[in-house]
Image (cartoon, rainbow, N blue to C red):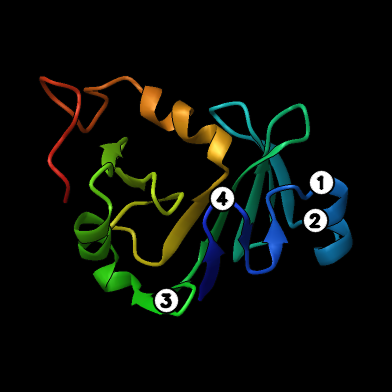
């Protein structure tokens, strides 16, 4: 389960956390790699923290069957429908359904992996080239 305060914290970890804060809280990661989009990822198996080179936390990905948003609990199987019904600004990029309202990105067909986004990285998701691989024409695919 993921407890999300959009753009603020995930499971008690604030988006103001540094790499040192994460290592202090969780110990050494199982692996540390630089991903294809230039973020440095600390992988703990069930949770991955991704940082910019500057040290700013960008994303927290965790395996969660249920998303908790305040007093609302949404099972992953219902999350795409929930996002479509509650976030008119939601869009699809690279197979991810992205919710600017909730600061969340996920692939509905890949159960239980949720990525919480820092507010400052939404622009990078919006800027992903339309048409690759999920969009055609006007730059936005129909939501799943």
Quarter-of-image position of residue 14: bottom right
Asked whether disc 2 touches disc 4, contact meaning CB atoms under 8 Å apart, the reply is no
Q: Find the distance from the CA under tag 2 to the CA under tag 4.
A: 17 Å
Asked whether disc 1 touches disc 2, contact meaning CB atoms under 8 Å apart, the reply is yes
Residue 124, horizontal then vertical, whole percent: 47, 27
Q: Which numbered disc covers residue 7?
A: 4
Mark 2 vs 3, N-terminal side: 2
Mark 3 vs 4, N-terminal side: 4
Label 1, residues with CA under 10 Å away: few <14, some 14-19, many ≥20: some
> Vertical placement of 142 versus 9: above or below?
above
Q: Find the distance from the CA under tag 1 to the CA under tag 3.
A: 26 Å
Q: Which residue is mark 2?
A: 22
117 relative position to 53: left or right:
left
Mark 3 falls on what kind of element? strand
Mark 2 vs 4, N-terminal side: 4
Mark 4 falls on what kind of element? loop
4 vs 1, front mark: 4
Q: Find the distance from the CA under tag 4 to the CA under tag 1.
A: 18 Å
Residue 103, horizontal then vertical, whole percent: 46, 49
Q: Which numbered disc covers residue 19?
A: 1
48 relative position to 16: left or right:
left
24 relative position to 71: left or right:
right
64 relative position to 46: left or right:
left
Q: Find the distance from the CA under tag 3 to the CA under tag 4.
A: 18 Å
Q: Which residue is mark 3?
A: 66
Mark 1 vs 3, N-terminal side: 1
Residue 1 or residue 89, whichever sits in front:
89
Residue 78, horizontal then vertical, whole percent: 25, 71
Q: Residue at x 69, y 31 (%)?
A: 52
């Amino acid at each position: 389960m993921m407890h999300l305060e959009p753009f603020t914290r995930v499971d008690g970890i604030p988006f103001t956390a540094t790499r040192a804060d994460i290592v202090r809280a969780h110990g050494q990661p199982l692996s540390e790699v630089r991903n294809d989009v230039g973020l440095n990822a600390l992988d703990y198996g069930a949770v991955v923290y991704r940082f910019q080179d500057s040290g700013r936390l960008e994303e927290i990905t965790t395996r969660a069957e249920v998303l908790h948003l305040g007093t609302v609990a949404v099972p992953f199987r219902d999350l795409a429908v929930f996002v479509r019904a509650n976030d008119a600004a939601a869009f699809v990029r690279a197979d991810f359904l992205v919710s600017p309202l909730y600061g969340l990105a996920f692939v509905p067909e890949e159960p239980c992996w949720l990525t919480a986004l820092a507010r400052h990285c939404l622009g990078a998701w919006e800027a992903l080239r339309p048409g690759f691989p999920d969009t055609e024409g006007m730059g936005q695919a129909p939501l799943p």
